[in-house]
Image: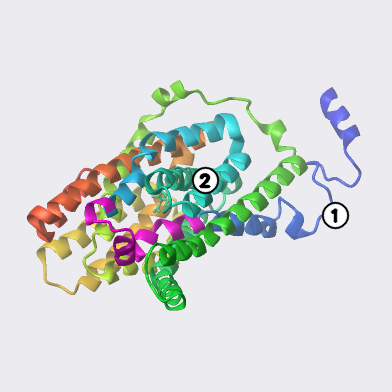
Amino acid sequence: MAERREYEGLLDEDEDDDGVPRHLFPLCDPTHLLHRILVLVFMCFLGFGSYFCYDNPAALQTQVIQDMSLNTASFMQLYAWYSWPNVVLCFLGGFLLDRVFGIRLGTIIFSLFVLLGQVGEYTAVIVVCGLFSIGGESLAVAQNTYAVNWFKGKELNLVFGLQLSMARVGSTVNMNVIGWVYGRIEAMLGSTGHTTLGITLMIAASTCLFSLICALILGFLDRRAEKILHKEQGRTGEVIKLTDVKDFPVSLWLIFIICVAYYVAIFPFIGLGQVFFIENIVYIISAPASPLLGFMVDRTGRNILWVMLAVITTLLSHMMLAFTFWNPWIAMCLLGLSYSLLACALWPMVAFVVPEHQLGTAYGFMQSIQNLGLALMSMAAGSILDLKGYLFLEVFFIACLCCE
Ligand SMILES: NCCCC[C@H](N)C(=O)NCC(=O)O
């Protein structure tokens, strides 16, 4: 009780009982919804550049293969080199976030990696592609950690839905714009080639610079809120240890399994989509659907039930494509909705089963396992397509989903 009196004696008469300054404008008050919406805007734009540039190779496939004299195998290495480093380094990135850098500095560092990787992507292809990939995946870990820190117990599924929606907007904008940008530069220079490709990708890098600026602003707002709300005093003081991974609860390992078994039937499917509409329609549906479905999950709870429903409807989508001659738009629209539901119901579940000081490590480990699955299954899917065709590929995706 004595401490409380001393503490009250330190209270500025301009502060309320919780030590928050009384005369802050709502937009500047970290406890006000308007301020949290402001933080959420920058949180959503954190991943915009990473998601936008991640799809550069797919959106410029013809140009990249032509200008860099690549064959399909070496072209696909761009994606392989995105996933393979993250099998280990994404987990390490999450651990460094929890134990060394902290959320603010870690987010800025990973945003810088994404920018440097994108700017240098076609000078030392494989190396800086790895730099971009480490930044991209670890930045997603940081983004998820920020979301939980600011919105756990409030609108967490809606927030994840909004973050994923902005990510899908980045992918969709890239798919529909970057080819036009390349054409304009080709017209200006009068030829295709490395220079045209390089200038196009430098323009794409501006989205990563934008995300880095958002990371800096977000770091300022988070540090300011920590000071005003005296958050550091509420910390448990616990620190993550690498050996803590062996103590992760079974429920978290089940979330990891669901994540990898689901996403190997989504990203490789989109990447191998035979016609352009497959890549676009899933993302175009997911952009508006994710926040709406996230709001629904927030209101109803039952995340596990929604994840199960999403897996079942995704399974039905693939079975429609494999075993029926129905209009593929039906299956693709169903897939876009089920993918959105899965994404906004599954990712927040990590925050329900691990303490705050382990969040970055848990998300990092989850994406490491996801990237291991994606790297292996992407190669397997490519081989199955070459050797056995699309029916066997769909059966392969159905088998992966049945492992959930
Ligand atoms: N630059 C792409 C980041 C991917 C982040 C992560 N691996 C992921 O899968 N996020 C969920 C999603 O549905 O995109």
Relative to the observer, which residue lies in front, 125 or 395? Answer: 125
Q: Residue 370: x percent and y percent?
A: 34, 42
Relative to the observer, which residue lies in front, 128 or 157? Answer: 128
Residue type pointed to by label 1: His
Confirm whether residue 37 shows in the render. Answer: yes
Quadrant in which residue 152 is drawn: top right
Horizontal side of residue 187 vs 29, given as left or right? left
Q: Which residue is mark 2?
A: 113
Q: Residue 223: x percent and y percent?
A: 71, 43
Range of magenta residues: 49-74
Q: Which mark is residue 23?
A: 1
Spot the residue most to the front: 190
**Which residue is found at the position 32% from the left and 69% from the top?**
281
Crowd class of label 2 (few under 14; some 14 to 19; many from 20; radius 10 Å)? many
**Which residue is found at the position 41% from the left and 56% from the top?**
54
* Distance in Å between CA atoms under marks 2 and 1: 39 Å
- Quadrant position of the N terminus in the picture: top right
- Quadrant position of the C terminus in the picture: top left
- Give the secondary structure at mark 1: loop
Confirm whether residue 1 shows in the render. Answer: no
Q: Which mark is residue 158?
A: none
